[in-house]
Image: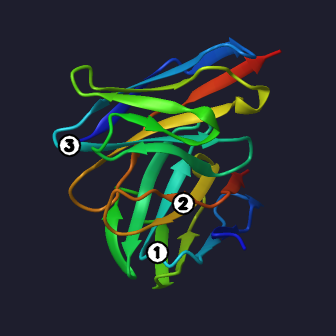
């Protein structure tokens, strides 16, 4: 059973389209994250939710809208896709307080043409 | 604010040689420190973590790291490289207090030649 699973694994789409990525974790964690990894492998946190409440929003354009229907799920919807949105998006989960570790999904590679 | 700096975007070693990947951190509060590994087309996997107990931390696959407060360093080592160690390695820091917000370094690609 995959601990943190993301779908889809690959998305290829045109500029201006809207797309969603879904994430689910079965680890019983109460905190989930979205990270963006760019073409140079740099990982940057985008959002974090704790028990469905947004706790981190790292100055991400408001075209990106996360939604957490429950503490085991965190989805990412992106409107009006731009070329610069091409990246690998990683979902992760953890317990709320440290020193725990983040458990990552396998990533969703988004390519905007 | 917290940050980590990884020296060297690429490190090349021969199989059987010592692996040394460098990480220096900056933190205004006591840090937790982590090393993660990313194999091609996969997510990140924790190698080891420092949580203010022992300064020498042992992780999976024979890796270890030493926390040196005086040098603000947390370098990753392995005595003998294996071909399967070829991957991207990330150092990360978070604060001891507060929730888990990991800040990652820019990564170091380890290349292992036969």
Element carrying mark 3: loop
Assign a secondary structure to mark 2: strand
Question: Compared with residue A28, is residue B10 higher up or lower down, i.e. above or below?
Answer: above
Can residue A82 be seen here? no
Kindly check if marks 1 and 2 are in contact, taking CB atoms under 8 A apart as contact. yes
Which colouring convention does the figure follow?
A: rainbow
| Quarter of the view holding residue A75 | bottom right
Res. A29 mark: 1
Above-or-below relation of B8 to A85: above
Residue at 22% over, 42% down: B1
Question: Residue at point 33% right, 64% down?
Answer: A56
The chain identifier of the residue carrying mark 2 reads: A
Q: Return the residue nearer the eye: B18 or A14.
A: B18
Q: Nearer the viewer, residue B111 or A34?
A: B111
Residue B12 spot, x, y in % from top left: 67, 14
In the picture of the structure, the residue carrying the numbered disc 3 is B30
Residue designated by label 2: A103
Residue B87 is situated, as x and y percent measured from the top left of the image, at 68, 33
Residue at the image position 22 percent from the left and 37 percent from the top: B27
Give the tally of numbered discs.
3
Instruction: Give the camera-side residue of A35 and B23.
Output: B23
Q: Name the residue furthest left.
A: B28
């Amino acid at each position: 059973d995959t601990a943190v699973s993301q779908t889809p694994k690959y998305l290829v789409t045109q500029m201006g389209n809207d797309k969603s990525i879904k994430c689910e974790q079965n680890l019983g964690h109460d905190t989930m994250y979205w990270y963006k990894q760019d073409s140079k492998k740099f990982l940057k946190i985008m959002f974090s939710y704790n028990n469905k409440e947004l706790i981190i929003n790292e100055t991400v354009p408001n075209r990106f809208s996360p939604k957490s229907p429950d503490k085991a799920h965190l989805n990412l919807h992106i409107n009006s896709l731009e070329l610069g949105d091409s990246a690998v998006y990683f979902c992760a989960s953890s317990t709320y307080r440290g020193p725990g570790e983040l458990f990552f999904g396998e990533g969703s590679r988004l390519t905007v043409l | 604010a917290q940050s980590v700096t990884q020296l060297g975007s690429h490190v090349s070693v021969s199989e059987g040689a010592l692996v040394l990947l460098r990480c220096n951190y900056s933190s205004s509060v006591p840090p937790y420190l982590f090393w993660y590994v990313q194999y091609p087309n996969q997510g990140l996997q924790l190698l080891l973590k420092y949580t203010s107990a022992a300064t020498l931390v042992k992780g999976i696959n024979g890796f270890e790291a030493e926390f040196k407060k005086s040098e603000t360093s947390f370098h990753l080592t392995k005595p003998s490289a294996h071909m399967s160690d070829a991957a991207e390695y990330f150092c990360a820091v978070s604060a001891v207090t507060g929730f888990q917000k990991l800040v990652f370094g820019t990564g170091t690609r380890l290349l292992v030649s036969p």
